[in-house]
Structures are given as C-alpha cells and as structure tokens.
Amino acid sequence: QVQLVESGGGLVQPGGSLRLSCAASGNIHSIHSIFAMGWYRQVPGKQRELVARLRNGDNPNYADSVKGRFTISRDNAKNTGDLQMNSLKPVYPAVYYCHADIMTIRFQRRAYWGQGTQVTVSS
C-alpha cells in the first residue's frame, strides 16, 4: 500500500507564494518509478480541475490560469513532487490534490490520490 501525503497548504496574502509538496509513503519499497505526477484543485461545489502535470519525458502541462505563475517539479530519487505557486490571486479557497501514476516493482501500474491540502489566498 502506497499513500500520497500533501503538505505546504495554508493561508497566504494575494501576490504571495506557497510551495506544496507531495511525498509517497507507506510501502515505498514497492515503487519502481513514478512516471507521472500532477496537481489538481477543487473548489466546493465545482468539479476538480487540472493545475499541473509532469510526465516522464514530456514538458509540463499547466492550466491556462496558472501558466507563468506555477511550476511543477519532482525528485525521482526521493519519490516526491512539488508545486511552486507564485503571484497567488485572491480566488475562492481550494483543496489541492496530488496525483501520481506509479509503476511497481512487479511492473504493475497504479494510480494514487493524496488527501488534499487547502490553499486560501486572502487579505
């Protein structure tokens, strides 16, 4: 069993920055590689939307609303991923979810979601 744990959420002023992190935990020894990691956000009453996604060998994919302000990155050796958020705008509070596509050491593909971390941008 593998779990994804997000951290770094909280309250930040408009124009500020926040860095979210996602770390794989649990039976990490079962992980051969993480071939894709992404971030999604959801406002209460709205559908979950893609924020950023990074797949091995590909360029990062960003939502139009965050291009130029957010940067997704990952550390393959540590099985972690980050989302650097700059120039944050005062929008509705949202829960950010980490998502990972993992290849196990038995060469089975598994997809995991984190429990989410809330981000609030307000004065």
Image (cartoon, helix red, strand yellow):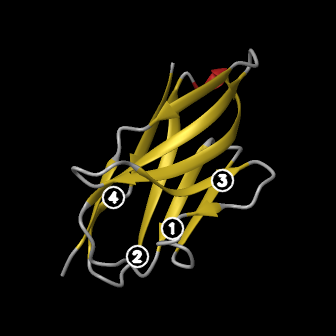
Q: From what the image shows, is residue 102 above or below residue 40?
A: above
Disc 2 target residue? 17
Q: Residue furthest bottom?
A: 15
Q: How many marks?
A: 4
Q: Which residue is mark 1?
A: 84
Which quarter of the figure has residue 67? Answer: bottom right
Circle 1 SS class = strand
Q: Disc 2 or 3, which lies upstream in sequence?
A: 2
Point 55% across, 21% down: residue: 27
The residue beneath circle 4 is 9
Q: Is residue 77 left or right of residue 120?
A: right
Which residue is at 57% across, 79% downward? 68
The answer to whether marks 2 and 4 mark residues whose Cβ atoms lie closer than 8 Å is no
Residue identifier under label 3: 54
Give the amino acid at mark 3. Answer: Leu
Decide if residue 122 is on the left or right side of residue 117. Answer: left
Query: Mark 2: which amino acid?
Result: Ser
In this view, the residue farthest toward the top is 106
Badge 1, how many Cα within 10 Å: few under 14, some, many 20+? Answer: some
Query: How far from the left and from the top, in percent, is residue 76?
Result: 70, 45
Observer-nearest of 80 and 53: 53
Secondary structure at badge 2 equals loop
Q: CA distance from mark 2 to mark 1?
A: 8 Å
- Above/below status of 108 relative to 15: above
Contact? badges 2 and 1 (CB < 8 Å): yes
The foreground one among 63 and 20 is 63
Precedes in sequence: disc 4 or disc 3: 4
